[in-house]
Image (cartoon, coloured by chain):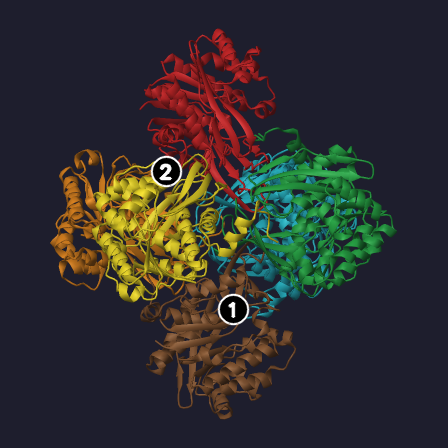
Chain colours: A brown, B green, C red, D cyan, E orange, F yellow
Amino acid sequence: MARFVCFGEILLRLSAPVGELLLQTPSVRTHVGGAEANVAVSLAKFGHDARVVSALPDNALGHAARDELRRNGVDTNAVHFGAGRMGLYFLTPGAGRRAADIVYDRAQSAFASAPAFDWKSILNGADWLHVSGITPALNRATADAALNAMRAARATGVKVSFDANFRVKLWEARGDDPRPTLDAFFAEADLMFADARDIALVTGERASTPEDAARIAFARYPSLHRIAATERKVLSADDNEIGGVMVTRSSVTRTASHAVTGIVDRIGGGDAFAAGLLHGLANGGGDQQILDFAVGAAVLKHYIAGDFNLSTAGDVDFYLSQSGVDVRR
Amino acid sequence: MARFVCFGEILLRLSAPVGELLLQTPSVRTHVGGAEANVAVSLAKFGHDARVVSALPDNALGHAARDELRRNGVDTNAVHFGAGRMGLYFLTPGAGRRAADIVYDRAQSAFASAPAFDWKSILNGADWLHVSGITPALNRATADAALNAMRAARATGVKVSFDANFRVKLWEARGDDPRPTLDAFFAEADLMFADARDIALVTGERASTPEDAARIAFARYPSLHRIAATERKVLSADDNEIGGVMVTRSSVTRTASHAVTGIVDRIGGGDAFAAGLLHGLANGGGDQQILDFAVGAAVLKHYIAGDFNLSTAGDVDFYLSQSGVDVRR
Amino acid sequence: MARFVCFGEILLRLSAPVGELLLQTPSVRTHVGGAEANVAVSLAKFGHDARVVSALPDNALGHAARDELRRNGVDTNAVHFGAGRMGLYFLTPGAGRRAADIVYDRAQSAFASAPAFDWKSILNGADWLHVSGITPALNRATADAALNAMRAARATGVKVSFDANFRVKLWEARGDDPRPTLDAFFAEADLMFADARDIALVTGERASTPEDAARIAFARYPSLHRIAATERKVLSADDNEIGGVMVTRSSVTRTASHAVTGIVDRIGGGDAFAAGLLHGLANGGGDQQILDFAVGAAVLKHYIAGDFNLSTAGDVDFYLSQSGVDVRR
Amino acid sequence: MARFVCFGEILLRLSAPVGELLLQTPSVRTHVGGAEANVAVSLAKFGHDARVVSALPDNALGHAARDELRRNGVDTNAVHFGAGRMGLYFLTPGAGRRAADIVYDRAQSAFASAPAFDWKSILNGADWLHVSGITPALNRATADAALNAMRAARATGVKVSFDANFRVKLWEARGDDPRPTLDAFFAEADLMFADARDIALVTGERASTPEDAARIAFARYPSLHRIAATERKVLSADDNEIGGVMVTRSSVTRTASHAVTGIVDRIGGGDAFAAGLLHGLANGGGDQQILDFAVGAAVLKHYIAGDFNLSTAGDVDFYLSQSGVDVRR
Amino acid sequence: MARFVCFGEILLRLSAPVGELLLQTPSVRTHVGGAEANVAVSLAKFGHDARVVSALPDNALGHAARDELRRNGVDTNAVHFGAGRMGLYFLTPGAGRRAADIVYDRAQSAFASAPAFDWKSILNGADWLHVSGITPALNRATADAALNAMRAARATGVKVSFDANFRVKLWEARGDDPRPTLDAFFAEADLMFADARDIALVTGERASTPEDAARIAFARYPSLHRIAATERKVLSADDNEIGGVMVTRSSVTRTASHAVTGIVDRIGGGDAFAAGLLHGLANGGGDQQILDFAVGAAVLKHYIAGDFNLSTAGDVDFYLSQSGVDVRR
Amino acid sequence: MARFVCFGEILLRLSAPVGELLLQTPSVRTHVGGAEANVAVSLAKFGHDARVVSALPDNALGHAARDELRRNGVDTNAVHFGAGRMGLYFLTPGAGRRAADIVYDRAQSAFASAPAFDWKSILNGADWLHVSGITPALNRATADAALNAMRAARATGVKVSFDANFRVKLWEARGDDPRPTLDAFFAEADLMFADARDIALVTGERASTPEDAARIAFARYPSLHRIAATERKVLSADDNEIGGVMVTRSSVTRTASHAVTGIVDRIGGGDAFAAGLLHGLANGGGDQQILDFAVGAAVLKHYIAGDFNLSTAGDVDFYLSQSGVDVRR
C-alpha cells in the first residue's frame, strides 16, 4: 500500500439517460468525477491510501461531491470548502455511431479561484503526487497552484505523476498559449501520461512513434523517467480497441489490443489506466505486468457507469486471467 | 384572447426526488421555469397569445428550455441565443415540516448579459407587458433592460404588469440598495403584484393592511391602477392556506381562504396567481370573479409538478365550482 | 371459502405519475382493472375461489391482463380470447384540490362484442354471481349478455350480486335510456350495491335516506334481500371520509365514519367494499361485523396503487383492530 | 430554408422498457410519432419551416401529441381537433436476435374520419407536400383525402413527395386491393421513396435492381422525377447495415454501406432518410452529397429513442466527417 | 400438451441496474427464478400443463414468488408454505468484458428444510418429472428428497429429466463429495442435460467429445436414453455463440452455431434449452427439429430480462425461420 | 465536537415503492440502517467524531453498507469483515391508514456471530459509547458482546448511552426471557432511552408517568443519571404527533407536541432523537434546549427517505426557529 495525493478539480456530471439526447426527457443522472479524483478513487479501490486535494463550494452540491469520494474510501480532509460554484458538465452519452457530447459549465468554480494549500503538511508521508493537464488549462492561478504543488513534492522527495490530458477547448476558453505552461509541467514529472501528439505540441518536435516521442521528451526533461499512454481505436461509441504502451529510458513495453465492445461508460478510461499504472509501480512487478494491469483496469472502467473505476485489483486480475467472461457463480 | 409579452430570465430547475435531500441519490429531475416564463405558459394555457422575451445560451440546455416553452404554446421567436451559461437552480423539495431549499446557480447567465431587444417591434400589437422584480435584482444591466422595456411599453400604450417578487438573497448578491431601482419600476406599473411588506420596503412607509399599503402606493405612483397579492399561511411544506386581495383606487376585493393540503409543488404559485389575474382582466368580468379565478389558478398550480401551471381555464372553473374533488369520469 | 363468478370487462389502466398531468412526462404506469375483476381479485385474496368471465383480445395486451388476474389467484379459465381491442382508460391521478381525470378508450373492445358463454357450465358449483352496472352501459349486446348470466344464475340457485355503478358518461355514449335496462337488472339481484340516487334514477321515486330508498326498492323488486352502499365525503383528492350502510328487509346497519387521509389510489374503493361484503356474507357473522369488514376493506384499498385491493382478510382485521397504525415489526 | 407541409396520422407509441416484453413490468414509455410527423420534425430540426396537417382527438392525449410536435418546432396550426380516438401503437422493442413486435390500435381514430382541410390556404407558400402510403392504407376516406391534397399541391405548383411505406397488415385490415389506389398516388409524385418491391407491387412489373424498377416507374408516371430508397440489411435487432440509392431520369447515385451497430431505436429510420433527402433537395448540392446526408440522417436516427430524428444538420455533417465517434469535448 | 412436474428451489433474484455494480445506486430489480421453476414457466408458455413442487416461506416474499409463477400459468398448488427464509441471490449483471457476479444468500431457506411431499398424488397423471443438480447440492435432506421424487416417478411410469447443473460453490459450501450423490441421480434419469465435464466428474472417466462422454454414461446408466447439452462460447458478457448437441443410444444430433450478440440477460439460458427440448420430445417430431427448437428457445431467453423464458412456441418458430430480425408489423 | 462509539448491527433495508405492497412491482429501493449506525450518522452530520463498531460480510453487500456509512462521515475502521450473511429487512412502507410492515431476514448474519473487538483500543479517546436493546435481543453471544463493551467503557471512563429499543418479535425468535439480560444492561447505562413500558418490563414495577417510571429506575440503577423518551401519538401512517420527555434525578423536562404530518419515512425517528440528545449533552446548554433539539431532530428525520437523519444541526435549529416552513430561497 502506497500513499497518493491527487490535486485537481472535482466536477459534477449530469447526464442524459442512455439513448437520449440531453433533456430529451426531464431526467438527469448525476455522477461525481474529475480526472484526478477518478485516479484517487481507483487507487483507494486498489487498497492504497489516496487523498484528494481540491476546492468545493460550501453548499449541498459541494458536500455531496465530497461525500461521494469519501464513500469510495478517499481521504477528503484536504478538500477546501469556500466561495464559488460547483463545476458542472452535462453529458449526452454516445450510442453506436452517434458521438457523446459534453457541455462544460465549470467557469467560476470554487476550484478555479485556486485557494492556497499547505503542501508541506498535505504531502507529508506521501509517495506520489498526481496532477493532470486540465488544471493548468483552467486559468493562470490554477496553473500556478499545480506547479507549486509539483515543486513542493519534488522538494520533499515525493514522486510526481502528470497526465497531460490536453483539452484544446479549455485552452481556447482560457485564451492562452499552452506550450510554455505545459513545458514547465513536463519538466517536473517523474512519470508522464502523454502520447506523441502531446509531446509534439509542447516540444515542437514531431515523432511518428511513441518510442521516438519518448526519446524527445527524455532528452528535454531530465527528471522524466517513464512515459505511458493508451492507444485507442474508436470503432463506434460503444466499440473500441485499447492497448497500452510504456517507455522508460531503457525499455519499451506494449500490451495486446483489447476488444472493448458493448461499452457502458467511456468517461474516465484514461484515468483508470493512470491509476492502474501507479498501482503497478507502487506494488512492484515487471513492466509487462504493470502495463497489462493498467490496460485491464482501463478496459473494466468502460463497463461501469460513472467517472470512477470501481473495480478492485482482484477484478482486474480476474479479467486478465479470462479469455471469455461467463457468470461468476 | 389578449396578447402578452413577458420579459425575464428562463431557468432550468434541477430537483431532488420527493422525500430526498439534494443528491442523496443520483437522480435529478429537470423543469424549466422563471417567474415571467411561468406567467407566459399559464396565459398560453388559458388561450392567450403569450410571448417570452429572454436570452438563452446557444447550446443543448438553452435549446431545451426554449423547446419546453414552445411545447406549452408560448411564442419564443423573441428569445435571443447568445453567449453565457444557462441559469440554473437546484431544488430540494420540502416535505411536511422540512422546508424546501434552493441553491441558485444563475450568475454569468446568457440573460445576465442583457442583450438589446427591439422593443418597438416586439411589443407591436401587445396588450400587456409583464415584468418581475427578479430581473432588476440580477444586475444593473438587466435592471436597465427591464426599465427600458416598461418605458417602451408605456410609450406605445401597452399596459405594464409588475410582480415585485422581492428576493433579498439576490439583492445581497448584487450588493446594491434595491429601493431606488424598485421605486423606478413601481412608477411604471399599471398593475402591481405586491404586498404591504414590498410597498414598505420601497416607499419607506409601513402599513398594517393591504388597503393602507395600497393607499400609500397609489399616492406615490400615479400610473398605478391596481395592486393584487396572495395571502398565504404556511402550515407545513405541504399544507398551506391561500387567499387573495386586490385593491384599486376605488375598491377592495378579497377571496375566501382556500385549504391547500397535500401540496405537490409549491414553486410558481405566485406566478400562477399573476397569470390568472391577467387572464381575468383581459377577459373582463367583475373584480370578485377575476380574483377568485386568480386564486383558483394559484391553488391548482400547487398540484402540478414543475414551475408551470398547466391548468386550463376550464380546470380552474371546475375547481371553483366544486366543494370536493372526486374523480372526473 | 365460497365460489364466486364475476362477469364484466377487464380494462388496462394507463396512468400518469403522481403529481403530473397525463403525458406531462413520457412515463405511463399500467394497471389491470375493471369493476368485476377488482371484486374477483379481492375475493381471491380473502381466500375464496373467484372466477372471472370476460373477453380479451388475443394479443400481448389481452394476455397480460389475464396474467395479472392469474397472478392474484383468480381463475381465468372462462376468459375468452377473440377479436376486438383491449379496453383502455387513461388516468390522471388527482392530488389535493385537483380532481383525478379519466379518458376512457374502451369502444370496440373484445368484451363489447359480447361473445356467448356457457353459463350452465361456468356457474356450476358457484355460490354467487357478481355483475355491475357498467356492463349494461356499454351496449345492448353486453346488457343482454349480463342479463342472461343473471337469469342463468337464478335458474340454478346461484345468488346474484349487482353493483349499480351508474356511469352517466357511458350511458350518454351509448345513447340510450338506462332506466328500463337497469330496472330489469335490479329485478334479478339478491344483493344490490346502490345508493338512494341510483334507486331514484331507476324507479323514478326519490328518497331522502338509504332506508327509504331501500324500502322503495324492496317493494318493487321481490327477489332483492339486501342493499348496501358506501357513504363517502370527498374533502380533497387525497382526503375522504367513508362509512357504510346496509339495509335488509328487516334491519339497518351503519358503520362509523373512517377518516381516509393521505390517499394513494382512489380507484376500486367501491369494488373493495363489494368484495368485503360478499366475503362477510359468505363467511357468516353478524351484519355489523360484515359491514365493518366491508368498509375496512374499502379503506385499505385507498392505500394500494392500482385498481385491485390486495389486502388479505388479516390485513383488514388488523386495520379494524387498531386505533392508530404504527409500523408492524 | 424551405417550407414543407406533411399530411398524415399522428400516433402515440407506448413501448416496453428495453429488454422486456410488453407489460412484463408495469411501465410504459410514450413517444409521439407517425411517418409524416417524423419527417416534419426532422425538417424542423434541420432549420426548415415544417407544418403538419392532421386530426387529433380533443382530449389530453391529442393535446399532448400536438404539444410534442410544437416542442420540436413544427407548426401545428393546421392540426384539427375533433371526434374519434387517439391512434395508438404498442411496441415491444427488439433486442439482439429477438425481433421487435408491434400491436396497432389505431382503428376509429380522429384522423381516420378524414376531416376536410382547406388545402389552398394550407399549401399557400409551401415548396413541398409530403404524404406517405400509410394514409391510403387506413380507409377510403383517408385515401381520398391524401389524393386530394396531392392534387391540390400539383395544381398550385407545390412539389409532391410520396413515401410508399407499404404496410401489408394495414391493407389486409382495410380489406381492399392496394394497387389501383397506390397507382393513383404514384402518378401524383415528383419524388418517391420506394424500392423495387413497392414498384413491382403497384405496376405489376418486377425488376431486379433499383435502376430497372425506376425505369419502369419513370415510364409509367410522367410526373415522377426522382426515386430514392434505403437498402437495409438486418443482421440482428440491434445490428443493421444501411445504404442509399437514388435514381433520376438521367442518373443513379449510391452511398457506401454504413454499419449501424448498437441500435437504440429502429422506428423512424426511413422517415429520417426521407427528411434528409428533402433537406438536401431544398438546400441544393450534388446528388451524392444529398444522398449521403440522407443516409447519415437515417443512421443517426437509430441512436435516438423515439420516432423522431432529433439530429441537427450539423450533427449529420459531423457524423459523415468522422471515421470513428469519440467523445465531443 | 403434456404434463410436467418440476421440483426444486424457487429463488428471488435482486439485481443491480444494467451497467452498475451491486448497490452502486440504491435501486434493485427483482425477478423470481430457480432452475426448475424456469423450466416450468417456459413449458407453460409453450402450452403445457406445468406444475412446480417447492417450499417457500409463508410471508410476503414467498407469496410474491408463488404469484409470479402463477402469473405465468404454472400450477402452484403443490408449493408448500412453511418455516425458513426466502432463498435469495444478488446479481451484478455483466457487461462487455466485465463478468456478471453472483452473491448467493440461500442458506436456511424454506426449501432447504425439505418438507415431505405426497409424490404419489402430485405425480398422478404426469408425463415427466424434471429435477436439477442444484437440489442435491444444497444439503443431504434436499438431495434425499429429490432422489425420492425421481424414484417415485420411475415407480409410476413418469419419465425423469435431470439437468446436472453442477455448481462447485454450492458443493463446497455443503462440504461433501458430489460424486456418489450425483451418481445415484444419473442412474434415475431417462433424459439428462449434461456435458462431458459433468459426466467425467461423476464417472471419473474423461471423454474428449459429447459422443464419447455419452457412450460412457449410457454404459453405466441403463435407464438413460438421451443426453443433451448446449455448447456455449463466451466472447464477452453480451456476445456468445450457442449450439446444441443431443446424443441417444443410436444417434448424434447437432445444430448450427447461433450468434447471440447484444445479450440482455444470460441467466436461465440452460433452463430454456431444457424446456425447449422437453417441449419437442412431448410434441414429437424429428431429433433435428427438437434440438433446433431447444437451441432457438435458449437463444431467445438471452433477450428477455429475468430468469424466465417468456417466449411462446410461435416466437421460437419465428426466430428459427428468420435470417434477420426486422420489426414485426 | 465529541467522540462517539456506536456498537450494533448494520442492516440493509429493501423497501417497496411508496403506495405499493412488497414486490407488487419488481422494484426495490435499498437503504443502509441499524439503530446504532443511524445514531452514528446523525452525530457525524452534527459535526462529531462518530465511529461504528460492527461486523459485516466480506462481500459486495457488506462493502456497500460500510461505504454508505463512510459517505456520511462515519469512521468505519472498526468494522470487522468476516463470515456470515448481510442482515436484511424488507419494508412495506405504510400509507395513511395502512400500517407499514417489516419482514426481518437477519438470522445468521456476520454480526450475529459476535466477533471479538479490542474495546480498549476502540474506546480510546471516546466520550460516549452508544448501544441499543436490539443487540442483546439477537442472541446470547451478541448480548455478551454488548455487555462487555459497556463494561469496558465504564472501566475507562467512557459514558454509556443505552437505547432500550425493546422488540418483542426478536426476543420471541431468540426464545429467551429478556428481563435478566436487560436488567444487566440498564445497570451499566449513564443515559437511557426508555419509556415507562420498558422500565416496567424489566423492573416488574409499573408506573403511570415517565416521572414515576424514572424514579423506579433511578432507585434500582445507581449509575443511571438521565432517562429520555419520545412520546408519540400515531394518528395514521403519515400523521403523528411527537413530543419528548427527559428526567434526571433532579428534574423533569418536556417539549411541546410537534405535529408531524405528511411523513416521508418513519424508520429511524427514535435514533434521530437519541443522536439529537447526545449532541445536546456533548455541546452543553440547558435541558430544555437539549430536549427541544432532540425532538426537532426526530421530527426532521420523518421527512428524509431512509434510516438516517441527514439533517445538520443548522437544519434542526432552522426548523425549531420557524412557525411555518416556507421555501428557503
Q: Is residue A37 above or below residue C250?
A: below
- In percent of width and height, residue A211 lies at 46, 87
Task: Tell me the chain of label 2.
Answer: F
- In percent of width and height, residue D189 lies at 69, 50
- In percent of width and height, residue C25 lies at 57, 47
On screen, residue D216 versus residue D283, left or right, reads left
Residue E145 occupies quadrant: top left
Name the residue rendered at 69%, 62% in the picture: B174
Q: Secondary structure at mark 2?
A: loop
Characterize the local packing of mark 2: few (<14), some (14-19) or many (20 or more) Cα atoms within 10 angstroms.
Answer: few
Residues D121 and E225: in front is: D121
- In percent of width and height, residue A49 lies at 38, 73
Say if residue C250 shows up in the picture. Answer: yes
Give me the C-alpha separation between circle 1 and circle 2.
54 Å
Task: Tell me the chain of label 1.
Answer: A
Residue C124 occupies quadrant: top left
Name the residue rendered at 40%, 23% in the picture: C292
Is circle 1 on the same chain as circle 2?
no
For the image shown, how many numbered marks are present on the structure? 2
On screen, residue A195 versus residue D288, left or right, reads left
Characterize the local packing of mark 1: few (<14), some (14-19) or many (20 or more) Cα atoms within 10 angstroms.
Answer: many
Residue wearing tag 2: F209
Residues E246 and F113: in front is: F113
Q: Which mark is residue D302?
A: none
Q: Name the residue at the front extreme.
A: F250
Residues F254 and F31: in front is: F254
Q: Amino acid at mark 1?
A: Ile
Residue wearing tag 1: A10
Residues C300 and E9: in front is: C300
